[in-house]
Amino acid sequence: MDPWGLTSTALLACVLFLIFLSLWSQRFKKGKLPPGPTPLPFIGNILQLNFKSIPASLSQLAEKYGPIYTLYFGTECVVVLHGYNILKEALIDQGDAFIGRGTVPMIEDVLEGKGIVFSRGERWKHIRRFSLMTLRNFGMGKRSIEERVQEEAQCLVEELRKTKGEPTDPTFILGCAPCNVICSILFRERFKYNDEKFLNLMNMLNENFHLANTLWAQLYNFLPAFRVYLPGNHKRFSRNAEGIKHFILEKVKEHQKMLDPSNPQDYTDCYLSKMQQEKDNPQSEFDLENLITTASDLFGAGTETTSSTLRYGLLLILKHPAVQAKIHEEIDRVIGHNRVPSIKDRQDMPYMDAVVHEIQRFVDLIPLNVPRAVTRDIQFQQYVLPKGTTIFPLLSPILYDSKEFPNPDQFDPQHFLDKNGKFKKSDYFMPFSIGKRSCLGEGLARMELFLFFTSILQKFTLKADGDPNEISIKAGSSGFSNIPPHYRLCFLPH
């Protein structure tokens, strides 16, 4: 390279470094941020993270810097909250200031701030309030949400019965059931597990869930400025997202043709009726685009998460025969072999309730939580967090807190049982997060998990394909979420 070229390169590097320092110093001037490791230009603290286990990396940093500290992902400032007390103080005690949504570039590029999970401000408030009210008052039509889940649980049992006790990978079947529940709530329609359109929807949801857990996705989210240099996985993610939206749009158009606002039958009917009510309001957030994106959010958040928990849960029960025996005893005593399980049975089944809670605690499905953001400049402890600061309120340190859950690395339903065998609640149980931005579908997910697990164990005994001690429970991948490993088991009649 000629001297002029070397000089130009050096000057460019200096200019870029000065720009970085300027941006960094401006950030500090806006507030008094918590301590943290010194970031490098452009890449921030990325090199201090182990991408194979980011939650563990963040916990190690907490040992050095305390329960609240600052990291830089590229030039993006992130404040990490580590532990129950600091999370409660932020998301509950000062919850109004922490209801913003942190940026997740891969999803932002697709959803563009619409829908419910990644929307902000008034849009989020209006759509969330409407959705909560609609799901809670699900008196639409003649069937409740519980009846829809019960129907799907029985369909799931029938599909498992078709395996005739042969070794089976349950991934596909356990994915169909929660996806069909979302279809029923949104469109009052369920699909056969071999329906072509349904299979296509399942494939797109499954592929995007796995793409979100890849190293590529983490680099894309943590270093978005470098996205042009990354492989084209974002195109696959975007293509699948558009395919999901197209599936939803077709169903919405069918609903528009048959809509009776006085007699809504599902979530989509309620939303379309709301659109009609507010058609003369230019500020209304209830439009077709937000409906499609909200429905897409419900599919994304309500299908693979529940499916993964079911797969992980059956694996853990399979690995612990004493737990399975106690579940069978309780089901036989409370429900019997013929009656369809009901959510009311949960109050008489403390052991099953404890097992479901322990599965969710142990699985730690979304260890990093979904990022928040502060909506205004805020004094928090001895620090000042500028408006817009991204917050990582970690869930792993709480679900694995050794004081609250002795031997947290062990799967043990006794974590949720008192000395008399009664169910014991814990404030540290927060797999759905806490505060005003906690998971919208928490009630639905808890109902599904109890009814699906209970229905399966009512009819089947789980048997390993080979030596159960050789089956690993280590996550198949761990990025945005902990995905269970693939395994095979036999569903034998009980």
Image: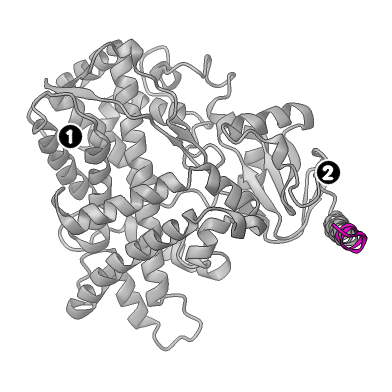
* Residue farthest toward the front in the current orientation of the protein: 2
| Secondary structure at numbered mark 1 | loop
* Crowd tier of the residue under label 2, counting other residues whose Cα lies within 10 Å: few below 14, some 14–19, many 20 or above: few
Give the position of the C terminus as an image quadrant: top left
The location of residue 325, given as percent across then percent down, is: 23, 13
Give the extent of the magenta segment: 1-10
| Residue type of the residue flagged with mark 2 | Gln
Q: Residue 382 carries which label?
A: 2
Q: Is residue 22 left or right of residue 206?
A: right
Q: Earlier in the sequence, mark 1 or mark 2?
A: 1
Q: Quadrant of residue 291?
A: bottom left
Q: Which residue is drawn at 65% across and 56% down?
A: 226
Tag 2, which secondary structure? Answer: loop
Q: Do the residues labelled 1 and 2 touch (CB within 8 Å)?
A: no
Task: Please name the predominant secondary structure of the magenta segment in the image.
Answer: helix
- Residue type at numbered disc 1: Pro
Q: Nearer the viewer, residue 215 or 407?
A: 215
Q: Which mark is residue 341?
A: 1
Q: How crowded is mark 1: few (under 14 residues within 10 Å), some or many (20 or more)?
A: many
In the picture shown, does residue 19 fall above or below 67? below
Instruction: Find residue 44 and report its horizontal and vertical position in percent.
Output: 75, 46
Direction from residue 304 to residue 165 in the image, left or right? left
Does the rendering let one see residue 230?
yes
Check residue 8 for magenta coloring. Answer: yes
Q: Position of residue 76 (x, y in %)?
A: 72, 54
